[in-house]
Image (spheres, helix red, strand yellow):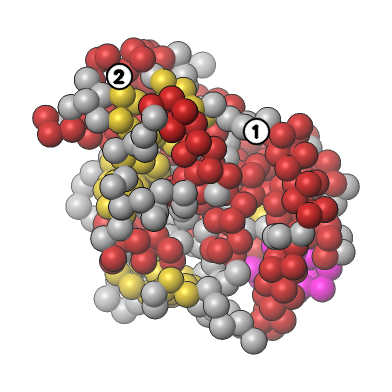
């Protein structure tokens, strides 16, 4: 019986009984293989030769000079498929192979997790089906095409808000029906145990590399680590290695939408309350009757009304701080990094960049060393940004 998977009171397993055996099987396999020599040698090979690890920790000299701080970018945008998602899909994909599963399903918002699952499925020879809200299908057409090119089926979800939350609902329904043959490859540190722990494990390579690299470059740990938070995998990945170092501030940046004070923003930890969503207890956007509100953000990857349970724990214990950045501020971060460093970030990552700029401008933070997790690149967002800027492409 599953007993772990709690971060304080957050996390747990709140799912239909039909899924419990699958979760127990998954936990057993994860605990068996996470320290297995053969499994880890194979995973490390694919992370290096297929995904392109290690990624650089780049000193953004122009931006640093402009803002009066030392700003380093952890370049997850340099990975195959364009984002950190590949770290987790390689780990879970291999785990599914070792478990003898013959089909992978996934949810996706911005499309990066869908692509990462599609290419891993192609590489491992395992068929893939990706669930994606129809609104996200429309605003991320390029990523849909990339998934289909890699052999994955893409199922548009027309229910609810037609975004990430609804794609997850449909993926769970599929898994219940096909649980014996199928592995549900969840893309973030959310969902029932063991997913939050397992996804963090596969993403912690970001933090291990970043810590080693900053010590080599600066001879000390950074003053602050900043990352965007949707479900929470890229942020938990880089936070993981710094959590025990109390002298390092951890800041998670959520999508604040258009900045208007409504119940529908993507800023779950800033605006939400405790509740259960997609199998675990965490913070969610909900009304007084416990009904889930629809999240809204310019970034499809931050357009989620929940968040991983470990982030909830870090918030209530005060170990990490969570802030919201508006769509307008994220676009400004997008433009500034592109203009000053020649690096075009994903809109998700642009939220972290935007808050790093805001942080650096505070008088008390002058001269501090900042590490920003650049979780993905901005190719997928060109049409959205161009539309916001009134450009035609």
Residue 226 vs residue 125, the one in the foreground: 226
Q: Magenta stretch containing residue 177, yes or no?
A: yes
Q: Quadrant of residue 172?
A: bottom right
Identify the residue shown where x is 57% and y is 40%: 84
Can you say which quadrant of the picture contains the N terminus? bottom right
x and y percent of residue 251 in the render? 31, 46
From this view, report whether residue 311 is shown above or below residue 122: below
Residue that appears at 36% across and 66% down: 313
Image mark count: 2
Q: Earlier in the sequence, mark 1 or mark 2?
A: 1
Q: Is residue 280 visible?
A: yes
Query: In terms of secondary structure, where does tag 2 sit?
Result: helix
Task: Using the image as rendered, state which of residue 385 and residue 17 is in the foreground.
Answer: 17
**Which residue is tagged 1?**
53
Q: Quadrant of residue 297?
A: top left
Q: Which mark is residue 64?
A: 2
Q: Position of residue 212 (x, y in %)?
A: 50, 36
Region rendered in magenta: 172-184
Q: Residue at x 65, y 63 (%)?
A: 171
Contact (CB < 8 A) between labels 1 and 2? no
Residue 32 drawn at (x, y percent): 74, 68
- Marks 1 and 2, how far apart at CA: 25 Å
Q: Is residue 84 magenta?
A: no
- 80 lies above or below 95: above
- Could you tell me which residue is drawn at 22 percent across and 25 percent down? 367
Q: Furthest-front residue in view?
A: 219
Whether residue 264 can be seen here: no
Where does residue 298 sit, x and y in percent of width and height? 39, 39
Horizontal arrangement in the rendering, residue 185 relative to residue 262 (left or right): right
Left or right, 90 with reference to 125: left
Please state which of residues 205 and 63 is positioned toward the viewer in this rendering.
Answer: 205
Helix, strand or loop for disc 1? loop
């Amino acid at each position: 019986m599953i007993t772990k998977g709690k971060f304080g009171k957050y996390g747990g397993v709140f799912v239909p009984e039909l899924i419990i055996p699958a979760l127990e099987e998954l936990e057993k396999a994860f605990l068996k293989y996470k320290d297995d020599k053969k499994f880890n040698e194979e995973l490390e090979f694919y992370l290096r030769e297929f995904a392109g690890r290690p990624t650089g920790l780049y000193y953004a000299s122009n931006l640093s000079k402009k803002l009066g701080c030392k700003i380093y970018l952890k370049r997850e945008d340099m990975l195959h498929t364009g984002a950190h998602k590949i770290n987790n899909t390689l780990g879970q994909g291999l785990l599914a192979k070792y478990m003898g599963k013959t089909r992978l399903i996934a949810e996706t918002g911005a499309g990066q997790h869908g692509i990462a699952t599609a290419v891993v499925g192609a590489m491992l020879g395992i068929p893939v089906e990706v669930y994606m809200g129809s609104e996200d299908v429309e605003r991320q057409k390029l990523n849909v095409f990339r998934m289909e090119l890699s052999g994955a089926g893409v199922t548009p979800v027309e229910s609810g808000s037609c975004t990430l939350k609804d794609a997850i609902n449909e993926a769970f329904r599929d898994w219940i029906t096909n649980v014996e043959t199928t592995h549900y490859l969840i893309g973030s540190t959310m969902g029932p145990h063991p997913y939050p722990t397992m996804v963090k494990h596969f993403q912690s390579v970001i933090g291990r590399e970043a810590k080693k690299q900053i010590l080599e470059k600066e001879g000390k740990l950074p003053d602050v680590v900043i990352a965007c938070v949707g479900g929470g995998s890229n942020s938990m990945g880089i936070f993981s290695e710094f959590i025990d170092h109390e002298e390092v501030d951890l800041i998670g940046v959520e999508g604040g939408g258009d900045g208007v004070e409504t119940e529908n923003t993507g800023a779950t930890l800033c605006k939400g309350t405790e509740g259960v969503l997609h199998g675990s207890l965490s913070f969610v956007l909900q009304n007084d009757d416990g009904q889930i509100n629809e999240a809204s953000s310019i970034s499809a990857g931050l357009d989620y009304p929940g968040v991983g349970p470990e982030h909830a724990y870090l918030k209530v214990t005060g170990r990490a701080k969570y802030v919201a950045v508006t769509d307008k501020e994220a676009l400004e971060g997008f433009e500034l990094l592109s203009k000053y460093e020649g690096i075009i970030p994903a809109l998700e990552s642009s939220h972290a960049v935007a808050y790093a700029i805001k942080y650096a401008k505070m008088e008390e933070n002058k001269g501090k060393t900042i590490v920003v997790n650049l979780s993905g690149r901005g190719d997928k967002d060109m049409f959205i940004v161009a539309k916001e800027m009134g450009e035609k492409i």
